[in-house]
Amino acid sequence: MRTTFKLLRLGALAAALALPLAGPALALDKVIHAGKLFDGASGRIQSNMSILVHDDRITKVVDGFVSPAGAEVIDLSGQTVLPGFIDVHVHIAVSGLDAKMRNSPEDQTLTAADNARKTLMAGFTSARDCGGDIEVTAALKRAINKGLVPGPRLWVAGQPLGPTGGHGDPSNDVDASWDRHDEWMLGVVDSPEAAVRAVRKLRQRGADLIKIMPSGGVASVGDDPNLQLMTDAEISAVVQTAHSLNMKVAAHAHGRAAIDAAVRLGVDSIEHGTYAGPESYAAMKQKGVYLVGTLTVAQDIYRIATTTPDKLPPGVAQKAIAVTPTMMGNVANAYKAGVKLALGTDTFGLRPHGQNGAEFEYLVQAGVSPADAILAGTRNGADLIGSSDIGVIAPGRYADLVAVAGDPLSDIKLLENVQFVMKGGAVYKSNGHAVDGRP
Protein backbone atom coordinates (compact mmCIF):
# COMPACT_ATOMS: atom_id res chain seq x y z
CA MET A 1 0.00 0.00 0.00
CA ARG A 2 2.79 2.40 0.92
CA THR A 3 4.65 1.77 -2.35
CA THR A 4 1.45 2.07 -4.40
CA PHE A 5 0.65 5.41 -2.80
CA LYS A 6 4.18 6.64 -3.47
CA LEU A 7 3.98 5.75 -7.17
CA LEU A 8 0.58 7.41 -7.50
CA ARG A 9 1.95 10.52 -5.81
CA LEU A 10 4.92 10.69 -8.18
CA GLY A 11 2.67 10.16 -11.18
CA ALA A 12 0.38 12.93 -10.01
CA LEU A 13 3.32 15.30 -9.69
CA ALA A 14 4.47 14.57 -13.23
CA ALA A 15 0.96 14.97 -14.59
CA ALA A 16 0.45 18.23 -12.70
CA LEU A 17 3.65 19.64 -14.13
CA ALA A 18 2.52 18.72 -17.63
CA LEU A 19 -0.92 20.39 -17.54
CA PRO A 20 0.14 23.66 -19.19
CA LEU A 21 2.40 21.81 -21.64
CA ALA A 22 -0.04 20.09 -23.95
CA GLY A 23 1.90 18.24 -26.63
CA PRO A 24 1.91 19.40 -30.25
CA ALA A 25 -0.74 18.02 -32.56
CA LEU A 26 0.31 15.03 -34.65
CA ALA A 27 -0.83 15.28 -38.27
CA LEU A 28 -1.11 11.93 -40.01
CA ASP A 29 1.12 12.78 -42.98
CA LYS A 30 4.06 15.17 -43.24
CA VAL A 31 6.85 15.72 -45.70
CA ILE A 32 10.08 17.41 -44.72
CA HIS A 33 12.02 19.20 -47.45
CA ALA A 34 15.67 18.93 -46.40
CA GLY A 35 18.13 21.20 -48.17
CA LYS A 36 20.90 18.99 -46.80
CA LEU A 37 20.48 15.56 -45.24
CA PHE A 38 22.83 13.63 -42.95
CA ASP A 39 20.97 10.35 -42.67
CA GLY A 40 23.12 8.77 -39.93
CA ALA A 41 23.87 5.71 -42.05
CA SER A 42 26.38 6.74 -44.68
CA GLY A 43 28.16 9.52 -42.80
CA ARG A 44 27.74 11.78 -45.85
CA ILE A 45 25.52 14.74 -46.65
CA GLN A 46 23.01 14.60 -49.51
CA SER A 47 21.28 17.60 -51.06
CA ASN A 48 17.61 18.34 -51.75
CA MET A 49 15.89 15.37 -50.18
CA SER A 50 12.33 14.73 -48.99
CA ILE A 51 11.43 12.72 -45.89
CA LEU A 52 7.89 11.37 -45.87
CA VAL A 53 6.30 10.72 -42.47
CA HIS A 54 3.08 8.92 -41.55
CA ASP A 55 2.05 9.11 -37.89
CA ASP A 56 5.30 8.60 -35.94
CA ARG A 57 7.33 6.76 -38.60
CA ILE A 58 9.34 7.59 -41.69
CA THR A 59 7.84 5.94 -44.78
CA LYS A 60 10.16 7.13 -47.55
CA VAL A 61 13.30 9.16 -48.18
CA VAL A 62 13.44 10.38 -51.79
CA ASP A 63 15.49 12.67 -54.00
CA GLY A 64 14.12 16.12 -54.72
CA PHE A 65 11.34 18.08 -53.07
CA VAL A 66 8.03 16.26 -53.36
CA SER A 67 4.66 17.34 -51.94
CA PRO A 68 2.19 14.43 -51.73
CA ALA A 69 -1.46 15.41 -51.73
CA GLY A 70 -2.79 16.01 -48.24
CA ALA A 71 0.61 16.02 -46.56
CA GLU A 72 1.76 18.92 -44.40
CA VAL A 73 4.95 20.36 -45.90
CA ILE A 74 7.72 21.37 -43.49
CA ASP A 75 10.21 23.53 -45.34
CA LEU A 76 13.75 22.94 -44.12
CA SER A 77 15.24 23.55 -47.56
CA GLY A 78 17.69 26.05 -46.09
CA GLN A 79 18.89 23.75 -43.31
CA THR A 80 20.70 20.48 -42.67
CA VAL A 81 18.47 17.71 -41.31
CA LEU A 82 19.93 14.96 -39.13
CA PRO A 83 18.58 12.07 -37.04
CA GLY A 84 17.51 13.03 -33.54
CA PHE A 85 20.56 12.94 -31.29
CA ILE A 86 21.16 10.25 -28.67
CA ASP A 87 22.96 10.80 -25.35
CA VAL A 88 23.78 7.40 -23.87
CA HIS A 89 24.96 8.69 -20.48
CA VAL A 90 22.80 11.19 -18.61
CA HIS A 91 21.40 11.53 -15.10
CA ILE A 92 18.09 13.15 -15.93
CA ALA A 93 16.84 13.48 -12.33
CA VAL A 94 19.97 15.20 -11.00
CA SER A 95 20.83 18.89 -11.22
CA GLY A 96 24.14 19.30 -9.44
CA LEU A 97 25.69 17.79 -6.35
CA ASP A 98 22.44 17.89 -4.35
CA ALA A 99 22.32 17.30 -0.62
CA LYS A 100 21.49 13.61 -0.34
CA MET A 101 19.16 13.81 2.64
CA ARG A 102 17.18 16.77 1.25
CA ASN A 103 16.56 15.56 -2.28
CA SER A 104 13.29 13.64 -2.02
CA PRO A 105 11.80 11.49 -4.80
CA GLU A 106 9.18 14.19 -5.27
CA ASP A 107 11.92 16.80 -5.77
CA GLN A 108 13.70 14.50 -8.20
CA THR A 109 10.53 13.85 -10.20
CA LEU A 110 9.84 17.54 -10.79
CA THR A 111 13.50 18.19 -11.58
CA ALA A 112 13.60 15.26 -13.98
CA ALA A 113 10.56 16.46 -15.93
CA ASP A 114 12.12 19.89 -16.43
CA ASN A 115 15.49 18.39 -17.40
CA ALA A 116 13.81 16.04 -19.86
CA ARG A 117 12.18 18.93 -21.68
CA LYS A 118 15.47 20.83 -21.89
CA THR A 119 17.22 17.75 -23.25
CA LEU A 120 14.59 17.29 -25.95
CA MET A 121 14.76 20.96 -26.97
CA ALA A 122 18.52 20.53 -27.45
CA GLY A 123 17.77 17.97 -30.15
CA PHE A 124 18.33 14.84 -28.07
CA THR A 125 15.28 12.77 -28.87
CA SER A 126 16.66 9.69 -27.09
CA ALA A 127 18.73 9.24 -23.94
CA ARG A 128 20.03 6.50 -21.67
CA ASP A 129 19.82 7.37 -18.00
CA CYS A 130 22.84 5.75 -16.38
CA GLY A 131 21.98 6.05 -12.72
CA GLY A 132 19.11 7.34 -10.63
CA ASP A 133 16.21 6.31 -8.42
CA ILE A 134 14.46 3.64 -10.48
CA GLU A 135 11.02 4.74 -9.26
CA VAL A 136 11.67 8.29 -10.46
CA THR A 137 13.30 7.52 -13.80
CA ALA A 138 10.88 4.72 -14.70
CA ALA A 139 7.93 6.97 -13.82
CA LEU A 140 9.36 9.74 -15.98
CA LYS A 141 9.84 7.32 -18.86
CA ARG A 142 6.22 6.20 -18.60
CA ALA A 143 4.99 9.81 -18.42
CA ILE A 144 6.97 10.74 -21.54
CA ASN A 145 5.66 7.69 -23.40
CA LYS A 146 2.09 8.65 -22.48
CA GLY A 147 2.62 12.24 -23.64
CA LEU A 148 2.15 13.71 -20.17
CA VAL A 149 5.51 15.52 -20.28
CA PRO A 150 7.83 16.33 -23.20
CA GLY A 151 11.16 14.57 -23.20
CA PRO A 152 13.42 12.14 -25.04
CA ARG A 153 12.79 8.45 -25.39
CA LEU A 154 14.37 7.04 -22.25
CA TRP A 155 16.23 3.85 -21.40
CA VAL A 156 16.81 3.78 -17.65
CA ALA A 157 19.27 1.90 -15.46
CA GLY A 158 18.01 2.75 -12.00
CA GLN A 159 20.44 2.59 -9.11
CA PRO A 160 23.98 1.73 -10.26
CA LEU A 161 25.42 -1.41 -8.66
CA GLY A 162 28.67 -1.31 -6.72
CA PRO A 163 30.28 -2.22 -3.40
CA THR A 164 30.00 -0.67 0.03
CA GLY A 165 32.06 2.52 0.01
CA GLY A 166 32.32 2.54 -3.79
CA HIS A 167 31.36 5.21 -6.29
CA GLY A 168 27.67 4.29 -6.18
CA ASP A 169 27.22 3.98 -2.41
CA PRO A 170 24.72 6.75 -1.55
CA SER A 171 25.73 6.68 2.12
CA ASN A 172 29.24 7.95 1.39
CA ASP A 173 29.84 11.27 3.16
CA VAL A 174 26.59 10.91 5.13
CA ASP A 175 26.52 10.76 8.93
CA ALA A 176 26.28 7.06 9.76
CA SER A 177 23.65 7.74 12.41
CA TRP A 178 21.18 8.79 9.71
CA ASP A 179 18.93 6.16 8.20
CA ARG A 180 16.24 5.97 5.54
CA HIS A 181 13.37 3.54 5.30
CA ASP A 182 13.17 3.27 1.53
CA GLU A 183 15.49 1.22 -0.69
CA TRP A 184 18.11 3.88 -1.28
CA MET A 185 20.82 1.21 -0.67
CA LEU A 186 19.43 -1.08 -3.39
CA GLY A 187 22.53 -0.54 -5.51
CA VAL A 188 25.05 -1.59 -2.86
CA VAL A 189 26.13 -5.17 -3.56
CA ASP A 190 28.92 -7.06 -1.79
CA SER A 191 28.56 -10.56 -3.22
CA PRO A 192 27.57 -12.29 -6.45
CA GLU A 193 24.29 -13.34 -4.83
CA ALA A 194 23.47 -9.76 -3.88
CA ALA A 195 24.35 -8.63 -7.41
CA VAL A 196 22.01 -11.19 -9.00
CA ARG A 197 19.14 -10.14 -6.74
CA ALA A 198 19.73 -6.43 -7.42
CA VAL A 199 19.67 -6.95 -11.21
CA ARG A 200 16.42 -8.87 -10.96
CA LYS A 201 14.89 -6.30 -8.64
CA LEU A 202 15.81 -3.42 -10.95
CA ARG A 203 14.37 -5.28 -13.91
CA GLN A 204 11.17 -5.83 -11.95
CA ARG A 205 11.00 -2.09 -11.20
CA GLY A 206 11.33 -1.11 -14.85
CA ALA A 207 15.06 -0.84 -15.61
CA ASP A 208 16.12 -1.31 -19.24
CA LEU A 209 19.84 -1.74 -18.60
CA ILE A 210 22.20 -2.19 -15.67
CA LYS A 211 24.98 0.19 -14.64
CA ILE A 212 27.87 -1.12 -12.54
CA MET A 213 30.66 0.65 -10.68
CA PRO A 214 33.70 -1.66 -10.87
CA SER A 215 36.08 1.24 -10.16
CA GLY A 216 35.98 4.24 -7.88
CA GLY A 217 34.87 7.58 -9.27
CA VAL A 218 35.70 11.27 -9.32
CA ALA A 219 32.63 13.11 -8.02
CA SER A 220 32.22 10.82 -4.99
CA VAL A 221 33.86 10.98 -1.57
CA GLY A 222 36.36 8.45 -0.29
CA ASP A 223 36.81 6.06 -3.22
CA ASP A 224 39.79 5.75 -5.58
CA PRO A 225 39.12 5.84 -9.35
CA ASN A 226 42.31 3.88 -10.00
CA LEU A 227 41.19 0.80 -8.07
CA GLN A 228 38.98 -2.14 -9.05
CA LEU A 229 36.39 -2.24 -6.28
CA MET A 230 34.04 -4.98 -7.53
CA THR A 231 35.30 -8.54 -7.67
CA ASP A 232 35.37 -10.47 -10.92
CA ALA A 233 32.71 -12.76 -9.49
CA GLU A 234 30.39 -9.82 -8.74
CA ILE A 235 30.89 -8.31 -12.21
CA SER A 236 30.31 -11.68 -13.86
CA ALA A 237 27.13 -12.28 -11.85
CA VAL A 238 25.72 -8.94 -12.98
CA VAL A 239 26.62 -9.47 -16.63
CA GLN A 240 25.27 -13.02 -16.82
CA THR A 241 22.03 -12.13 -15.06
CA ALA A 242 21.45 -8.95 -17.05
CA HIS A 243 22.17 -10.61 -20.39
CA SER A 244 19.83 -13.47 -19.51
CA LEU A 245 17.13 -10.82 -19.10
CA ASN A 246 18.06 -9.15 -22.43
CA MET A 247 19.53 -6.15 -20.60
CA LYS A 248 22.82 -4.50 -21.49
CA VAL A 249 25.48 -3.60 -18.94
CA ALA A 250 27.29 -0.26 -18.78
CA ALA A 251 30.44 -0.20 -16.64
CA HIS A 252 31.70 2.97 -14.99
CA ALA A 253 35.45 2.40 -14.99
CA HIS A 254 38.44 4.74 -14.77
CA GLY A 255 41.29 2.45 -13.70
CA ARG A 256 42.82 -0.04 -16.14
CA ALA A 257 42.28 -3.10 -13.95
CA ALA A 258 38.54 -2.40 -13.70
CA ILE A 259 38.29 -1.60 -17.41
CA ASP A 260 40.04 -4.77 -18.48
CA ALA A 261 38.09 -6.95 -16.05
CA ALA A 262 34.75 -5.51 -17.16
CA VAL A 263 35.57 -5.99 -20.84
CA ARG A 264 36.83 -9.54 -20.26
CA LEU A 265 33.68 -10.41 -18.34
CA GLY A 266 31.32 -9.21 -21.06
CA VAL A 267 30.00 -5.69 -20.41
CA ASP A 268 28.55 -3.79 -23.37
CA SER A 269 30.10 -0.38 -22.75
CA ILE A 270 32.84 1.27 -20.74
CA GLU A 271 31.83 4.65 -19.36
CA HIS A 272 34.79 7.07 -19.05
CA GLY A 273 37.60 4.50 -19.51
CA THR A 274 40.19 7.06 -18.44
CA TYR A 275 43.28 4.89 -17.94
CA ALA A 276 42.66 2.34 -20.67
CA GLY A 277 45.76 1.14 -22.50
CA PRO A 278 46.57 -0.50 -25.85
CA GLU A 279 45.56 -3.93 -24.55
CA SER A 280 42.27 -2.48 -23.30
CA TYR A 281 41.49 -1.01 -26.72
CA ALA A 282 42.39 -4.24 -28.49
CA ALA A 283 40.04 -6.22 -26.23
CA MET A 284 37.23 -3.66 -26.63
CA LYS A 285 37.55 -3.71 -30.41
CA GLN A 286 37.64 -7.51 -30.50
CA LYS A 287 34.55 -7.84 -28.32
CA GLY A 288 32.65 -4.89 -29.82
CA VAL A 289 32.54 -2.99 -26.52
CA TYR A 290 31.70 0.69 -26.83
CA LEU A 291 33.60 3.52 -25.18
CA VAL A 292 31.46 6.37 -23.85
CA GLY A 293 34.08 9.05 -23.22
CA THR A 294 31.92 11.60 -21.29
CA LEU A 295 34.13 14.57 -22.17
CA THR A 296 31.50 17.12 -21.13
CA VAL A 297 31.58 16.14 -17.46
CA ALA A 298 35.38 15.98 -17.61
CA GLN A 299 35.53 19.57 -18.83
CA ASP A 300 33.01 20.76 -16.25
CA ILE A 301 34.41 19.14 -13.13
CA TYR A 302 37.98 20.08 -14.05
CA ARG A 303 36.92 23.72 -14.52
CA ILE A 304 35.27 23.78 -11.10
CA ALA A 305 38.18 21.95 -9.47
CA THR A 306 40.70 24.48 -10.76
CA THR A 307 38.64 27.66 -10.19
CA THR A 308 36.23 27.10 -7.28
CA PRO A 309 37.28 23.82 -5.62
CA ASP A 310 35.33 24.67 -2.46
CA LYS A 311 32.12 24.01 -4.40
CA LEU A 312 33.00 20.31 -4.59
CA PRO A 313 32.77 17.71 -1.80
CA PRO A 314 35.94 16.93 0.18
CA GLY A 315 38.67 15.31 -1.92
CA VAL A 316 36.80 15.59 -5.23
CA ALA A 317 38.80 18.54 -6.57
CA GLN A 318 42.08 16.67 -6.12
CA LYS A 319 40.70 13.64 -7.93
CA ALA A 320 39.31 15.76 -10.76
CA ILE A 321 42.63 17.51 -11.31
CA ALA A 322 44.41 14.16 -11.42
CA VAL A 323 41.91 12.22 -13.56
CA THR A 324 39.99 14.37 -16.00
CA PRO A 325 42.80 15.84 -18.15
CA THR A 326 43.52 12.27 -19.30
CA MET A 327 39.99 11.63 -20.60
CA MET A 328 40.29 13.49 -23.91
CA GLY A 329 43.51 11.66 -24.75
CA ASN A 330 41.80 8.39 -23.93
CA VAL A 331 39.05 9.09 -26.48
CA ALA A 332 41.67 10.02 -29.07
CA ASN A 333 43.62 6.82 -28.48
CA ALA A 334 40.51 4.63 -28.53
CA TYR A 335 39.33 6.23 -31.78
CA LYS A 336 42.71 5.64 -33.43
CA ALA A 337 42.62 2.03 -32.26
CA GLY A 338 39.24 1.46 -33.90
CA VAL A 339 37.12 1.21 -30.73
CA LYS A 340 33.46 1.99 -31.29
CA LEU A 341 32.41 5.33 -29.75
CA ALA A 342 28.98 6.42 -28.51
CA LEU A 343 28.19 9.94 -27.36
CA GLY A 344 27.54 10.38 -23.67
CA THR A 345 27.84 13.55 -21.63
CA ASP A 346 27.37 12.30 -18.04
CA THR A 347 25.16 15.34 -17.56
CA PHE A 348 24.09 15.69 -13.93
CA GLY A 349 23.94 19.43 -13.53
CA LEU A 350 27.50 20.72 -13.39
CA ARG A 351 26.26 22.61 -16.42
CA PRO A 352 22.55 22.98 -17.12
CA HIS A 353 20.73 20.11 -18.78
CA GLY A 354 20.05 20.89 -22.43
CA GLN A 355 23.66 21.67 -23.33
CA ASN A 356 24.39 18.07 -24.33
CA GLY A 357 25.41 19.14 -27.84
CA ALA A 358 28.77 20.37 -26.57
CA GLU A 359 29.94 16.74 -26.52
CA PHE A 360 30.07 16.78 -30.33
CA GLU A 361 32.61 19.61 -30.22
CA TYR A 362 34.69 17.90 -27.52
CA LEU A 363 34.82 14.70 -29.58
CA VAL A 364 36.11 16.66 -32.56
CA GLN A 365 38.67 18.39 -30.33
CA ALA A 366 39.85 14.92 -29.31
CA GLY A 367 40.54 14.08 -32.95
CA VAL A 368 37.30 12.37 -33.97
CA SER A 369 36.15 13.41 -37.45
CA PRO A 370 32.96 15.52 -37.50
CA ALA A 371 31.10 12.77 -39.36
CA ASP A 372 32.16 10.12 -36.87
CA ALA A 373 31.30 12.42 -33.95
CA ILE A 374 27.77 12.77 -35.34
CA LEU A 375 27.53 9.02 -35.91
CA ALA A 376 28.57 8.52 -32.26
CA GLY A 377 25.52 10.57 -31.28
CA THR A 378 23.10 8.93 -33.70
CA ARG A 379 23.68 5.51 -35.32
CA ASN A 380 26.20 4.27 -32.74
CA GLY A 381 24.07 5.37 -29.81
CA ALA A 382 21.14 3.43 -31.22
CA ASP A 383 23.32 0.35 -31.67
CA LEU A 384 24.59 0.52 -28.09
CA ILE A 385 21.08 0.95 -26.72
CA GLY A 386 19.94 -1.94 -28.89
CA SER A 387 17.18 -0.13 -30.78
CA SER A 388 16.56 -0.44 -34.52
CA ASP A 389 13.91 2.31 -34.36
CA ILE A 390 16.18 5.34 -33.83
CA GLY A 391 19.51 6.82 -34.90
CA VAL A 392 19.07 6.74 -38.71
CA ILE A 393 16.78 8.53 -41.14
CA ALA A 394 15.31 5.61 -43.07
CA PRO A 395 11.93 4.00 -43.78
CA GLY A 396 10.48 2.25 -40.75
CA ARG A 397 12.42 4.30 -38.22
CA TYR A 398 10.82 6.77 -35.84
CA ALA A 399 10.47 10.24 -37.32
CA ASP A 400 13.00 11.70 -34.88
CA LEU A 401 14.65 14.60 -36.71
CA VAL A 402 16.63 17.74 -35.96
CA ALA A 403 17.84 20.55 -38.18
CA VAL A 404 20.57 23.18 -38.01
CA ALA A 405 21.29 26.27 -40.07
CA GLY A 406 24.51 25.38 -41.89
CA ASP A 407 26.87 22.48 -42.48
CA PRO A 408 27.79 20.67 -39.24
CA LEU A 409 30.63 18.83 -40.99
CA SER A 410 32.29 22.21 -41.46
CA ASP A 411 31.19 23.71 -38.11
CA ILE A 412 30.39 21.11 -35.46
CA LYS A 413 29.33 23.80 -33.00
CA LEU A 414 26.12 24.23 -35.01
CA LEU A 415 24.83 21.13 -33.25
CA GLU A 416 24.69 23.11 -30.01
CA ASN A 417 22.00 25.34 -31.50
CA VAL A 418 19.37 23.19 -33.20
CA GLN A 419 16.60 25.09 -34.94
CA PHE A 420 14.10 22.28 -35.38
CA VAL A 421 13.16 19.22 -33.33
CA MET A 422 10.71 16.49 -34.30
CA LYS A 423 10.14 13.39 -32.21
CA GLY A 424 7.84 10.66 -33.45
CA GLY A 425 6.39 12.92 -36.14
CA ALA A 426 5.46 15.68 -33.66
CA VAL A 427 7.22 19.05 -33.90
CA TYR A 428 8.54 20.38 -30.60
CA LYS A 429 10.80 23.15 -31.87
CA SER A 430 10.63 25.24 -35.03
CA ASN A 431 12.64 28.24 -36.23
CA GLY A 432 14.70 28.01 -33.07
CA HIS A 433 11.73 28.30 -30.70
CA ALA A 434 9.82 25.72 -28.67
CA VAL A 435 6.28 25.30 -29.96
CA ASP A 436 4.92 25.37 -26.40
CA GLY A 437 6.09 28.98 -26.11
CA ARG A 438 8.45 28.39 -23.21
CA PRO A 439 12.08 29.54 -23.41
Image (cartoon, rainbow, N blue to C red):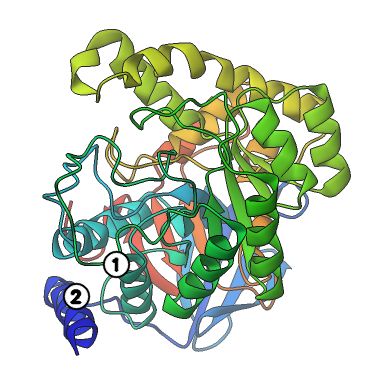
Q: Residue at x 24, y 14 (%)?
A: 309
**Label 2 vs label 1: CA separation?**
8 Å
Picture quadrant where residue 371 is located: top right
Instruction: Check disc 1 and give the amino acid type.
Output: Val
Relative image position of residue 184 (x, y in whole percent) = 29, 59
Residue 279 is left or right of residue 395, and the answer is right
Instruction: Check disc 2 and give the amino acid type.
Output: Leu
Looking at the rendered structure, the secondary structure element under dot 1 is helix
Q: Residue at x 20, y 56 (%)?
A: 111
Measured along the vertical axis of the image, is residue 216 above or below residue 152? above
Q: Which residue is mark 2?
A: 10
Q: Residue at x 14, y 74 (%)?
A: 13
Measured along the vertical axis of the image, is residue 55 above or below residue 168? below
Residue 101 is left or right of residue 372, and the answer is left
**Residue 194 shows in the view:** yes
**Residue 424 shows in the view:** no
In this view, the residue farthest toward the top is 306
Q: Which residue is mark 1?
A: 136
Picture quadrant where residue 98 is located: top left
Measured along the vertical axis of the image, is residue 144 above or below residue 171? below
Looking at the rendered structure, the secondary structure element under dot 2 is helix
Q: Are marks 2 and 1 in contact (CB under 8 Å)?
A: yes
